[in-house]
Image (cartoon, rainbow, N blue to C red):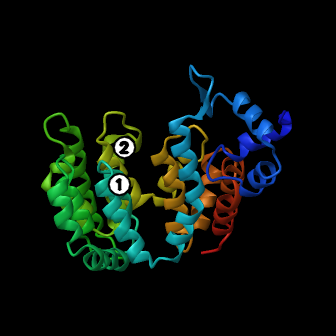
Amino acid sequence: MAHPKEISALNKAFTGLGVDEKTSISILTKWHPHQLHSYRKATPDFFIEDERQFERWSDPRVLQLRQEFIRFKDAVVLRTMHPWERDARLFKEALQMGPRIDIIIETACTRSSEDLLGARRAYHSLFHRSIEEDIASQIRTSERKLLVALVSAYRYEGPHVQEERAKSEAEVLYNAIKAVAKKNPTENEEVIMILATRSKSHIKAVYKYCEEISGNHLQQDPDGDWALKQTVQCLCMPHAYFSKILDASLRTDVDEAARDSVTRVILTRADVDIKQIKEEFQHKFSGVSLSKRIEEVANGNYRDFLLALVSKEN
């Protein structure tokens, strides 16, 4: 019989983000066939016994475990990529996965003007097409115009804000949000112009004045358009946005798309603003550090790699 403590340790090694390679190797290489048999019997979550009393891996578990074994390798590959290539591939994968409009918004709105331009150039080199034409041809929802405009943006990045213009555009944004039942604000040409051409400093001012007009926190409006809210948050409050994504992803019971978000966020922000994201995470989630959450959920080399990246200073 396999020892109960070893069964528990192996189950833990196979659960979470990544795989605890050292534990799984040390246990599995010393077990004899009868111990492997008792392990299969003792773990019905992993193994299914059919009418012939044959224990077989659950197909979803096989797929999940294979993905967890390669998660560390994927993270290493992403780390070695030029950031422009990495972002270009993120855009392409986002278009192929559903599409994932949230990833397109995130990538377009949290990069500098030069980095977004670089990603567009890398996309040309990798796929012999432009991001804009692929979005225009593949996105069929109301967000298409906004997405094309966001990925095409080349914003002024200085601190100067025209306050009167910001107040005027706050009224435009507020009126578009109020009229959401008649027309989606992400289809409003003036809203798209504001979100895709103004500097991030200017949009922060617009957002501030818009909240003063409405008297509400727009991010907490349950009836608000999700794409508009994410766009504003990524442009104005990226550290809060990334903290929220990491909190939702660093759990053992999330789907594969959420699991992938951990790698995406940490790998793309490690050399940019991971220090500020860590601070925001700890502030936002009752003093729990990002490193602690990673230690609780991730395993093995993948865990160690993430911890090393989040310990970097900008």
The quarter of the rendered structure image containing the N terminus is: top right
Distance of mark 2 from mark 1, alpha carbons? 10 Å
| Amino acid type of the residue tagged 2 in the rendering | Leu
Mark 2 or mark 1, earlier in chain: 2
Q: Position of residue 117 (x, y in %)?
A: 30, 77
Q: Residue at x 45, y 79 (%)?
A: 82
In the picture of the structure, the residue carrying the numbered disc 1 is 232
* Residue 159 seen in the current view: no
Q: Position of residue 240 (x, y in %)?
A: 51, 54
| Secondary structure found at label 2 | helix
Q: Is residue 152 left or right of residue 78?
A: left
Mark 2 or 1, closer to the camera: 1
Q: Nearer the viewer, residue 294 or 53?
A: 53
| Amino acid type of the residue tagged 1 in the rendering | Val
Q: Position of residue 113 (x, y in %)?
A: 34, 76
Q: Are marks 2 and 1 in contact (CB under 8 Å)?
A: yes
Tell me where residue 190 sits by quadrant.
Answer: bottom left
| Secondary structure found at label 1 | helix
Q: Is residue 225 above or below residue 74?
A: above
Q: Position of residue 229 (x, y in %)?
A: 34, 48
Residue 218 numbered tag:
2
Q: Is residue 251 above or below residue 49?
A: below
Q: Nearer the viewer, residue 54 or 114?
A: 54
Tell me where residue 166 sits by quadrant.
Answer: bottom left
Q: Is residue 73 left or right of residue 150?
A: right
Q: Is residue 255 above or below residue 130?
A: above
Q: Residue at x 36, y 47 (%)?
A: 211
View extreme (top): residue: 51
The quarter of the rendered structure image containing the C terminus is: bottom right
Q: Residue at x 60, y 53 (%)?
A: 281
